[in-house]
Image (spheres, rainbow, N blue to C red):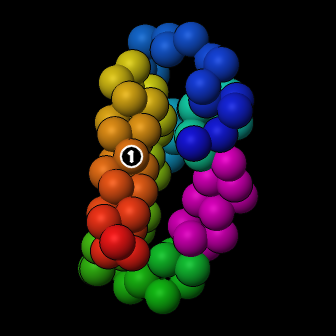
């Protein structure tokens, strides 16, 4: 969890219908650190390996980053992440005893 995310109030989820929408959301800091750059690299790779009749890889990249933006924008995300981290710490502590 980034400090930026913990301090940022949760604004309404932006529209994520197009590649431009996803780019704009990531540019506005609505994703996780590095997502804006990773999105462009992943999208370029998917486009380079796709055919005109099979753009599934491109669609997968778009869906992945739209999901990342949704998760980052969820007001309950921080609590769920902390709960998971606490559970992992508890499990690790129990395995050492």
Q: Quadrant of residue 82?
A: top left
Nearest the camera: 35 or 78?
78
The residue that appears at 39% across and 75% down in the rendered structure is: 96
Residue 58 is situated, as x and y percent measured from the top left of the image, at 41, 68
User: Which quadrant is home to the C terminus?
Assistant: bottom left
Q: Does residue 33 appear anywhere in the picture?
A: yes
Vertical placement of 90 versus 43: above or below? Answer: above
| Residues drawn in magenta | 33-44
User: Which quadrant is home to the N terminus?
Assistant: top right
Nearest the camera: 79 or 27?
79
**How would you classify the magenta stretch by its main secondary structure?**
helix
According to the picture, the residue beneath numbered tag 1 turns out to be 86
Vertical placement of 85 versus 9: above or below? Answer: below
Magenta stretch: includes residue 62? no
Residue 74 is situated, as x and y percent measured from the top left of the image, at 37, 26
Which secondary structure, mark 1? helix
Could you tell whether 54 is left or right of 26 in the image? Answer: left
Q: Residue furthest front?
A: 97
Could you tell whether 32 is left or right of 64 in the image? Answer: right
């Amino acid at each position: 969890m980034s400090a930026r995310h913990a301090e940022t109030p949760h604004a309404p989820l932006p529209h994520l219908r197009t590649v431009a929408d996803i780019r704009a959301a990531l540019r506005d800091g609505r994703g996780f650190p590095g997502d804006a750059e990773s999105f462009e690299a992943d999208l370029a790779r998917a486009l380079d390996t796709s055919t005109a009749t099979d753009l599934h890889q491109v669609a997968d990249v778009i869906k992945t980053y739209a999901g990342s933006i949704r998760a980052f924008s969820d007001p309950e995300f921080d609590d769920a992440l902390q709960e998971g981290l606490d559970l992992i710490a508890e499990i690790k502590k129990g395995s050492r005893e």
